Image (tube, grey):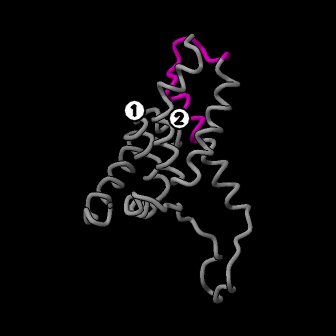
Amino acid sequence: MKPFEAIVREHGAVVLRVCRAVLGPNDAEDAWSETFLAALRAYPELPAGANVQAWLVTIAKRKAIDVHRATARRPVLVPELPEPGSDDGRSTEMPGPGEHDGLWAALRTLPQRQREALAYHHLAGLPFAEVAVLLGGTEAAVRRSAADGLKKLRTMDGEELR
């Protein structure tokens, strides 16, 4: 088995890109750290010949779910109460101040399943069969989600993505 430091060097950037795509830039680094802390504990029991990158992306997905759940449990401070009949005040937006605001805004417009399918396949390089296992469902459904997400992103004006 490779030393764990080599695993971090080899796969760290991919896992960070996946975390950023799924969670946004503000929560990504915490999820990345949590991913590798969990991986460090479990690495000695990893079977020889296992797909390490897929294993790490699976852990990152679970950490992203934890972040989403924690966010949903946190109280939301609002300056005034929303009008009756409006949403419940929760925000599902990914925070994204920085140089890629347009890209984060575009990714926020995608349904979560499309965003995750794109991240796991195109950023992490996982085959659709493995993405289907991660997301639950069939390989064809995951392909469709990724294709629909890409189609929507391609229809956006290039200036919107900057």
User: Is 52 rendered above or below residue 75?
Assistant: above
> Disc 1 on helix, strand or loop?
loop
Q: Which residues are magenta?
A: 44-61
For the image, the number of numbered tags is: 2
Q: Position of residue 108 (x, y in %)?
A: 46, 62
Mark 2 and mark 1: Cα distance apart in space: 12 Å
**In front of the other: 154 or 38:** 38
Can residue 132 be found in the magenta stretch?
no
Quadrant of res 87: bottom right
Which residue occupies 37% across, 63% down? 102
Q: Is residue 108 left or right of residue 1?
A: left
Q: Which residue is mark 1?
A: 127
Q: Position of residue 61 (x, y in %)?
A: 57, 41
Q: Is residue 105 left or right of residue 161?
A: right
Which residue occupies 65% across, 88% down? 84
Q: Residues within 10 Å of mark 2 (few under 14, many from 20)?
A: many
Q: Which residue is mark 2?
A: 57
Query: Where, quadrant-wise, is the C terminus in this rendering?
Result: bottom left
Which residue occupies 49% across, 48% down? 20
Can residue 52 be found in the magenta stretch?
yes
Q: Which mark, by number, is residue 12?
A: none
Main SS, magenta region, reads helix
Which residue occupies 29% across, 56% down? 151
Residue depth check, mark 2 versus mark 1: number of the one nearer the observer: 2
Verify CB contact (< 8 Å) between mark 2 and mark 1.
no
User: Is 113 rendered above or below residue 11?
Assistant: below
Q: Is residue 157 left or right of residue 109?
A: left
User: Is 60 rendered above or below residue 68?
Assistant: above
